[in-house]
Image (cartoon, grey):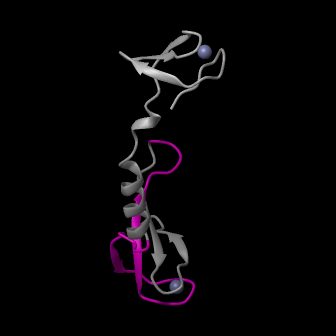
Amino acid sequence: MEFCDECGSMMKAEDGTWVCGSCDFTKPKGDAAAYTVTEDQEASEVIESSGETSLPETDALCPECGHDRAYWYMKQIRSADESETRFFICSECEHKWREDDN
Ligand SMILES: [Zn+2]
Ligand SMILES: [Zn+2]
């Protein structure tokens, strides 16, 4: 739905252009917002599945609670010459820490 910038009347689509029915004002149809019907369905699916973590789990000793299992992921921090650092998230208490350099 589009309304005329000049008189506020409802406009109708004609060959890729919005045309005002009252004053013949026209403007190009550049807006794709009216054609996003299926995106709502995809968004709700993402929300439903976001409750579970997809991170891999490994043997790692939590410094906080002593639990021996943790999720982990790689992340590059600061400058590019620094190698990727492994981060752990305790599967018990969710404490987060980074792996020290060996
Ligand atoms: Zn108009
Ligand atoms: Zn822990």
Asked if the stretch drawn in magenta spans residue 23, the answer is: no
Please report the residue visible at 33 percent of the width from the left and 72 percent of the height from the top: 56
* Range of residues picked out in magenta: 51-80
Q: Is residue 5 left or right of residue 100?
A: right
Asked if the stretch drawn in magenta spans residue 63, the answer is: yes
| Relative height, residue 80 to residue 27 (above, below) | below
Seen from the viewer's position, the closer of residues 48 and 77 is: 48
Q: Is residue 3 left or right of residue 15?
A: right
Seen from the viewer's position, the closer of residues 17 and 42 is: 17
- Residue farthest to the right? 7
- Residue farthest to the front? 22
Q: Main secondary structure of the magenta part?
A: loop
Percent position of residue 55, x then y = 36, 69
- Residue farthest to the bottom? 66
Q: Quadrant of the C terminus?
A: bottom left
Please report the residue visible at 45 percent of the width from the left and 48 percent of the height from the top: 82
Seen from the viewer's position, the closer of residues 80 and 1 is: 1
Please report the residue visible at 34 percent of the width from the left and 78 percent of the height from the top: 58
| Relative height, residue 25 to residue 54 (above, below) | above
Seen from the viewer's position, the closer of residues 39 and 29 is: 29
Percent position of residue 30, x then y = 45, 22
Percent position of residue 96, x then y = 54, 73
Percent position of residue 16, x then y = 38, 17
| Relative height, residue 28 to residue 44 (above, below) | above
Please report the residue visible at 65 percent of the width from the left and 14 percent of the height from the top: 6
